[in-house]
Amino acid sequence: MRKSVIGALAVAAGLLSASSPLPAHHGTATLDTSKTLTLKGNVTEWDWSNPHCLLQFDIKDGGGQTVHWIAETQNPAEMVSLGWGKDSFKPGDEVTVSLMPVKNGRPYGRIRQIALPNGKTFVTVKEGLTPKEVGDSSGSSKTENYPKQ
Amino acid sequence: MRDRSMASVIILVAAVILSAPAFSQNAQPEHPGSSKVQKATAAPAPFHNISGTWEPANGPGDGIQPYGVKAMPNDGKREHELPYTPYGLQVYKSHKALIGPNEVHLTSYNDPRDTCEPLGFPRANFYNLRETQILQDPYKVAILYEYGQAWRVVWTDGRTLPKLVDGGVLVGNEVREPRFYGYSVGKWEDGSTLVVQTVGMMPEDKVWLDGTGRPISDQLRVEERFHRVDHDRMELTVTIDDPKMYTKPWIAMNKFPLRLQDPHFDVTEMYCSPAEMEKYNKLFGSPASEKADQPTGQ
């Protein structure tokens, strides 16, 4: 059933991107880095925690069955620097998730980006940058946001 | 009357000179250490002072070091092969790392980091070296690492480095325990270079050198050179000398460039929580890593 689920989805069989989310906790042994899947569904849970934030969301496959996906980002501090937050997603939110799926064909993967219906996009890496340049700040709050005395 | 107005002039001139670096610091955009700004406003290094919030100058990702220690990444290149002793090579091969050329699946690792054991020193320099806050007083330098909310103290009060003995270090007449973050003593080599020696770190069954599984033992001696190049820039060089694991000393970080952040910069927490790690492994790590023909068990 899972194989047909994968087959029914839009598979962007792109080239291996030069700018993948930089590994910190673990590398890419578990992932099929040659694939990017784009999935549209609704959030069930957004878990802001270490070592990876986790987005859980339901999609409908070609046969109308609900498939529950779990996808990871990098750690929260890293995500802060890319503009994500603990309240970025709420249960029920409609999301379009681009991710690298895992090799074993199960509905798990590492997020590349998430787009909301209002056009807002969350990226896990700034495209076009070398791994060195990834992340414009350090995973910390911006200076303007510190509480002023 | 004349003395008072002369004193006022002196005070005024002194105030302008003393505030000039601070003014240029505040006038800089969000990243005061960026090279463009540095050329325009970099003041000289203050004397015997490495305090401040320091981040990797080439961008925060530069300190993640996913492929192992910066100067000798674990990439299979000949020039990056480490001078292992036979025992060192044996211990390296026993390490199952989540990153690096021999990375394993999430269900197979044995890195102590992955059960949230303290990272320890010197691995704190080689894994997610990010916003590093350095505070100093006349007696010591305290280094606060963003990852793991860890800190260590470097004594600059003139005490001698403890002597390495079996099972620990000798402090005075007392044998003291090994420490995850070691025992460190620092000396100023010149006006802007602090040389730090560290001994008394944990044995090989408790800590790794880096995330790709390179080993270290309790016989390790680490030398760090914190060279403050100018007001906004510092270079860190780290030498590893572990006769149990390596046949000779080697450089793990070579003038790694750091830039000074704004002192108001809020540093977020990066921590390893056993409860969160267990939840992640159960929810994602295990099912994502299992072979396709195995049941999910969920």
Image: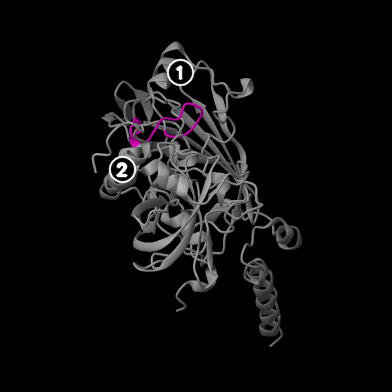
The three-letter amino acid code for the residue at tag 1 is Pro
Q: Nearer the viewer, residue B55 or A119?
A: A119
Magenta region: B98-112
Q: Nearer the viewer, residue B139 or B221?
A: B221
Place of residue B187 in the rendered image (x, y in percent of width and height, measured from the top left): 52, 40
Q: Earlier in the sequence, mark 1 or mark 2?
A: 1
Dot 2: element? helix
Dot 1: element? loop
Question: Residue farthest to the left?
Answer: B297
Q: Is residue B82 left or right of residue B180?
A: right
User: Badge 1 is on which residue?
Assistant: B243
Q: Is residue A38 left or right of residue B147?
A: right
Place of residue B274 in the rendered image (x, y in percent of width and height, measured from the top left): 27, 46
Place of residue B244 in the rendered image (x, y in percent of width and height, measured from the top left): 42, 17
| In magenta segment, residue A91 | no
| On-image quarter of the C terminus of chain A | bottom left
Tell me the residue at 43%/59% (across/down).
Answer: B268
Main SS of residues in magenta: loop
User: Badge 2 is on which residue?
Assistant: B281
The three-letter amino acid code for the residue at tag 2 is Asn
Q: CA distance from mark 1 to mark 2?
A: 37 Å
